[in-house]
Image (cartoon, rainbow, N blue to C red):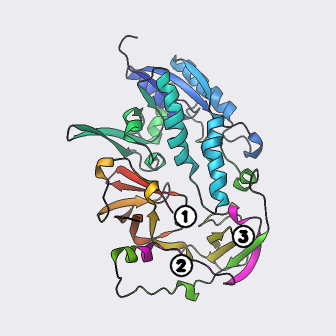
Amino acid sequence: MGNKKRVIVGLSGGVDSSVSAYLLKEQGYDVIGLFMKNWHDDSVTISDECPWLDDSNDAMLVAEKLGIPFQTVDLSEQYKERIVDYMFNEYENGRTPNPDVLCNREIKFDVFMKIALSLGADYVATGHYCRRDSLQINGKTQYRLLAGKDKNKDQSYFLCQLSQEQLSKTLFPIGELQKSEVREIAAQQNLVTANKKDSQGLCFIGKVRLPDFLQQKLKPKKGDIVEVDAANDIYKKELPKSFSSKEEELDFLAQKTIYPLGIGKKVGEHNGAHYFTKGQRKGLAVGGTPLPLFVIETDVVNNIIYTGQGKHHPGLLRRGLLVKPNEIHWVREDLAIKTGESMPVKARIRYRQTLEDAKLYQTEKGLYVIFDAPQTAIAEGQFVAWYLDDELIGSGVIS
C-alpha cells in the first residue's frame, strides 16, 4: 500500500455510503468499510423498514463488490447511553430532542471516528450530502462545512455540532453530486443498493412509533387536550414603545407564551404530554374543527396539551429564541462573536426548513437568534443552525 491514504467509510447499507466508498476507491484511497450496529430492540420498529440485519448484509455485499475489507462494530451500548437515554430524558422534560444531530456528534464523529483512527485511518468518510473545504487564516487552517450541491438533500444541518478537529479528518465524497447522479453511479457499478429506498426515522433505529418507543421508559398517563382560540387575549402582547436595554428587547422577542391553568376549552384526552411535540398535527384524535388542530405547547408538569387551529395560529409563531452559553457551538471558532456583538446570518430551526434571515446577538445570558419573520413551532431541545451563504458556521440547542 505504501503511502496511500487510508479512509474508513461508515457503510450503512444505503446507496449514499456505497457510492462514497466506490468514489474514494476510484480516487486511489485505501478504503475499508465499517458497519455500525447501534440497535438491538426490533420490538418498536414498524414493519421491516431499516432492520439492521438487512442493512449489514447490503453493506457487506457492497464491500465484496468493490473488493474492500469489511467489518462490523457494535456500538449499541454507547448508542443507548448517549442517544436513547438522552432522548427519554428530554421528552420527559417536555423538550424535543434531535437524535440525528446527536448521533453524528456523539457516535459517528466521536466513538466511530476514534475506532477508525485506531485502525490506522487518515480519514473517516460518510454518505452525507454536504461539502468540506479549508481556508488559511492567519497561518491557521480553518475547515468549512458547506451545504451539499443537491439543495433538496443538503444534510449540513445534521452535522451542525461538528468541530474543527472532526472536520479535519472527514471526507464527504458525494457532496458535489445530485441524488440522481449517486443512484446512476450505483446502477452503473451494479451495487445492490442502487434502487434501495432511503431509510426514514430515527438515526440507526429506523421507523418507529415514537409513543411505542418512549413507552419503554415513559409511562402513559391520561390528560386533557385544551384548545386555545387564536383571538385569546393572551396573544395581544403589545410591543412596548421603548425598552430599557437591548437585552430587554431581545427577551421580549424570544419569549414564549405561558398558558395559565384554566385557559381555553377541553376538546379531548391524550395518553401523556411527554409523547407530543410543538407543531405536531397527527396523533391528537380530535376531529370536527374547521381547521386542523396543531400542538402549540405541552405542559408536562400538569400533563396538558395546548392546541390551536391552523398552521398560522399565533401560539405557533415566535420571532426569536435563546441559546444558553454552555449550548453555543461555533464550527468556525474564528468567527465567534463576543458579548455585545451581533451578526446577520441565515438560520434554520429544523432540517429541510428553508434558510431564513436572522441576526445573532451575543449577551451575558446567551446567544439570541432573532428572525426577520416569525417562525413556526420553535421547539426547546431542537437545534438552531446559522450560516453565512452556504457555509454552516455554528449551532446551538434551543432553550
Three-letter residue code for mark 3: Asn
Q: Position of residue 276 (x, y in %)?
A: 67, 63
Q: Position of residue 199 (x, y in %)?
A: 60, 42
* Residue 191 visible in rendering: no
- Residue picked out by circle 2: 314
Instruction: Give the magenta part as a residue range.
Output: 251-274
Q: Is residue 124 above or below residue 329?
A: above
Give the residue furthest to the front.
364
Q: Position of residue 87 (x, y in %)?
A: 63, 51
Q: Is residue 269 magenta?
A: yes
Of badges 1 and 2, nearer the viewer stands 1
- Disc 2 crowd rating (10 Å Cα; few below 14, some 14-19, many 20+) is many
Sequence-wise first label, 1 or 2: 2
Which disc, if any, is residue 379?
Answer: 1
- Disc 1 crowd rating (10 Å Cα; few below 14, some 14-19, many 20+) is many
Sequence-wise first label, 1 or 3: 3
Residue at mark 1 to residue at mark 2: CA–CA distance: 15 Å
Q: Position of residue 328 (x, y in %)?
A: 42, 55
In the image shown, does 334 or 187 lie closer to the viewer? 334
**Residue at 49% from the left image edge and 23% from the top image edge:** 118
In the image shown, does 390 or 184 lie closer to the viewer? 390
Which disc, if any, is residue 303?
Answer: 3
Residue 355: quadrant of the picture: bottom left
Of badges 1 and 3, nearer the viewer stands 3
- Disc 3 crowd rating (10 Å Cα; few below 14, some 14-19, many 20+) is some
CB atoms of marks 1 and 3 within 8 Å: no
